[in-house]
Amino acid sequence: MKESSREKVASLIPVVTEFEKPFWDSLQDEKLMVQKCQKCGNVQFPPSPVCTHCLSNDVKWIPCSGKATLWSKVTFHKFYLEPYNDVPYSVVMAKLEEGPVVTGRISEEAASKTPFDAPLSAAYVKTADGTVVVEFVPA
Ligand SMILES: [Zn+2]
């Protein structure tokens, strides 16, 4: 797992509810999890207590392959939140192989060289406060 000097990232994470806890716990184990509806098969992220397609409350957590494609990207040249003061930095919206779109960091070099729809892989970064976040790298 890569280490990051960013600090106080945990302070930016919203209060983790019982519905989001499996996602954050899985990152600690370097796994990416999303929810799958057991009634209609809808795969969703962010987590919800019910299926966002059919409203069934029979949703289970499934592990993701970590494979994704670059759906959107942006590079920040001004920082807005102290833990993210290492500008410039880039963020992608990665469309997971399982369907949902997840946001994560990407290196500036990779962001500038990676075209839309290019394959990405999930990687895991431990920040200075111990929080593990997902980052994407070209596959
Ligand atoms: Zn459903």
Image (tube, rainbow, N blue to C red):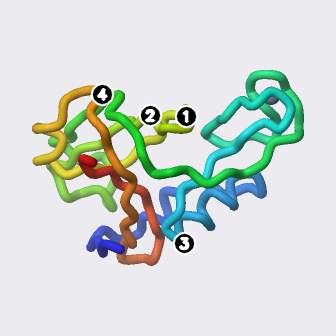
State the image coordinates of residue 116 (x, y, percent, origin top left).
25, 27
SS category of the residue bearing label 2: strand
Mark with earlier residue (2, 1): 2
| Residue for point 63% across, 46% down | 34
Identify the disc placed on residue 100. 1
Mark 1 Cα shell of 10 Å, populated few (<14), some (14-19), many (≥20): some
| Mark 4 or 3, closer to the camera | 4
State the image coordinates of residue 112 (x, y, percent, origin top left).
12, 38
Name the amino acid, label 2.
Answer: Lys
Name the amino acid, label 3.
Answer: Asp
Identify the disc placed on residue 95. 2
> Would you say 105 lies left or right of 98 here?
left
Mark 2 Cα shell of 10 Å, populated few (<14), some (14-19), many (≥20): many
SS category of the residue bearing label 4: loop
Rounded to the nearest angstrom, the CA distance separating label 3 from label 1 is: 20 Å
Ligand 1: image quarter: top right
> Would you say 130 lies left or right of 135 here?
right
Mark with earlier residue (4, 1): 1
Q: Quadrant of residue 41?
A: top right
Mark 3 Cα shell of 10 Å, populated few (<14), some (14-19), many (≥20): few
Mark with earlier residue (3, 1): 3
Name the amino acid, label 4.
Answer: Asp
| Residue for point 19% across, 52% down | 107
The quarter in which the N terminus is drawn is: bottom left
Nearer-the-camera pick, 130 or 121:
121
Nearer-the-camera pick, 31 or 48:
31
Name the amino acid, label 1.
Answer: Pro
All told, the count of numbered labels is 4
